[in-house]
């Protein structure tokens, strides 16, 4: 008996995720594959080890023990690997520990700040010296953001966006898009570490042994502050957490991460790194939403709101990244 779990269907690498019976309990079955119908074109699986969407990366992270050891210094770990089973030449079955605990979307502000602290402690140990493994994502932030499908002739005047976002904010987000290469360069100039690149509450479980971090498919070198920025912002994009908590969560994450990396980065530098990488990670989001809104009456993915509600619900985060981009 298997229970299919909620996951993104846009990425070609993910073939499915299920909770299954295993021994006297349960386990998680996850299929990764090199080919699958119905995926988004910009999230096509790659056979190139350094590509941000290399399809064999997550099995390698588990097989080599990196999921358990990468952030162990901070008390963060991945689920235990139970089995890894090849399924021909273009698919792999992973059987993973079914972690019990508090779902990430239910974590409180202090909990998220605590996770940021633990992340900082772990990443300070990799500062300036991320592992030189060819199969890690070589430049996730650049490759992922520039792969986002935004047409050259994008119309910025969609009625739903105009109704939900103030004129000044829309103008600021357009400038953010136009400055995207400048932002990428600023992020690339920051001190490097080992990043997970998808730290958000859907990939976190608060367990008694310490937080467990799921989905290691994008792991690779990145900037100090990059994962913390993603945690602060991605807690809110899809409307699962009350956006009124945004200021408190942002400060808790920045403060926690700053304490964790205090031996390698001063507090002011930490704040700037989070601001720069946060603006860089999401410079494409409004243009992408506009392109999708013009082509489809309904959004897709985790966020099920209508377009106007989605634009309005994301406005505080949009304002934040527009403001943060001024740190560049």
Image: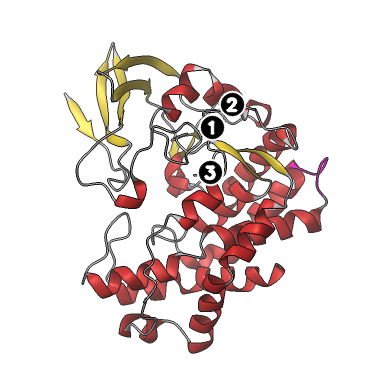
Name the residue rendered at 24%, 71% in the picture.
295
Query: Dot 3 lies on which element?
Result: loop
Q: Is residue 90 magenta?
A: no
Mark 3 neighbour class, 10 Å CA radius: few under 14, some 14 to 19, many 20 or more: many
Residue 197, label in figure: 3
Q: Which residues are magenta?
A: 261-265
- 14 above or below 285? above
- The mark nearer the N terminus, 1 or 3, is 1
Query: Residue 311: x, y in percent?
Result: 38, 74
- 57 above or below 197? above
Name the residue rendered at 52%, 65% in the picture.
283
Q: Residue furthest bottom?
A: 167
Q: Which residue is mark 2?
A: 133
Mark 2 neighbour class, 10 Å CA radius: few under 14, some 14 to 19, many 20 or more: few
Callouts 1 and 2 close, C-beta under 8 Å: yes
Q: Quadrant of the N terminus?
A: top left
Is 38 displayed left or right of 314 in the figure? left
Q: Which residue is mark 1?
A: 136
Query: Residue 107: x, y in percent?
Result: 50, 47
Is 65 displayed left or right of 192 in the figure? left
Q: Please name whichever residue, 96 or 61, is drawn nearer the observer in this view of the structure.
A: 61
Query: Dot 1 lies on which element?
Result: loop
Which of pointers 2 and 3 indicates the residue nearer the eye? 2
Query: Dot 2 lies on which element?
Result: loop
Residue 117 visible in the displayed image: yes
Main secondary structure type of the part rendered in magenta: loop
Q: Quadrant of the C terminus?
A: bottom right
> What is the image's colouring?
secondary structure
């Amino acid at each position: 008996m298997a229970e299919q779990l909620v996951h993104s269907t846009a990425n070609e690498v993910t073939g499915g995720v299920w909770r299954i019976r295993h021994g006297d309990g349960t386990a998680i079955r996850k299929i990764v594959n090199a080919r699958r119908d119905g995926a988004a074109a910009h999230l096509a699986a790659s056979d190139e080890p350094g590509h941000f969407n290399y399809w064999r990366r997550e099995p390698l992270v588990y097989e080599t023990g990196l999921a358990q050891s990468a952030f162990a210094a901070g008390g963060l770990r991945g689920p235990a690997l139970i089995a890894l089973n090849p399924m021909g030449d273009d698919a792999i079955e992973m059987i993973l520990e079914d972690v019990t605990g508090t779902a990430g979307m239910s974590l409180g502000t202090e909990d998220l700040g605590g996770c940021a602290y633990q992340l900082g402690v772990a990443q300070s140990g990799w500062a300036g010296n991320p592992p030189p493994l060819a199969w890690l994502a070589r430049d996730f932030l650049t490759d992922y953001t520039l792969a986002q499908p935004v047409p050259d002739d994008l119309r910025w005047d969609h009625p739903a966006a105009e109704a939900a976002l103030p004129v000044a904010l829309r103008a600021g987000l357009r400038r953010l898009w136009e400055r995207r290469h400048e932002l990428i360069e600023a992020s690339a100039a920051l001190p490097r570490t080992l990043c997970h690149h998808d730290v958000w509450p859907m990939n976190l479980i608060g367990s008694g042994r310490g937080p467990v971090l799921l989905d290691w498919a994008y792991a690779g070198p990145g900037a100090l502050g990059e994962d913390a920025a993603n945690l602060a912002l991605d807690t809110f994009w899809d409307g699962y957490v009350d956006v009124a908590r945004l200021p408190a969560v942002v400060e808790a994450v920045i403060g926690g991460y700053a304490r964790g990396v205090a031996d390698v980065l001063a507090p002011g530098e930490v704040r700037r790194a989070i601001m720069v990488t946060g603006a860089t990670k999401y410079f494409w989001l409004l243009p992408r939403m506009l392109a999708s809104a013009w082509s489809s009456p309904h959004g897709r993915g985790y966020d099920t709101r209508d377009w106007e509600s989605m634009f309005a619900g994301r406005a505080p985060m949009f304002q934040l990244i527009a403001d943060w981009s001024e740190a560049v």
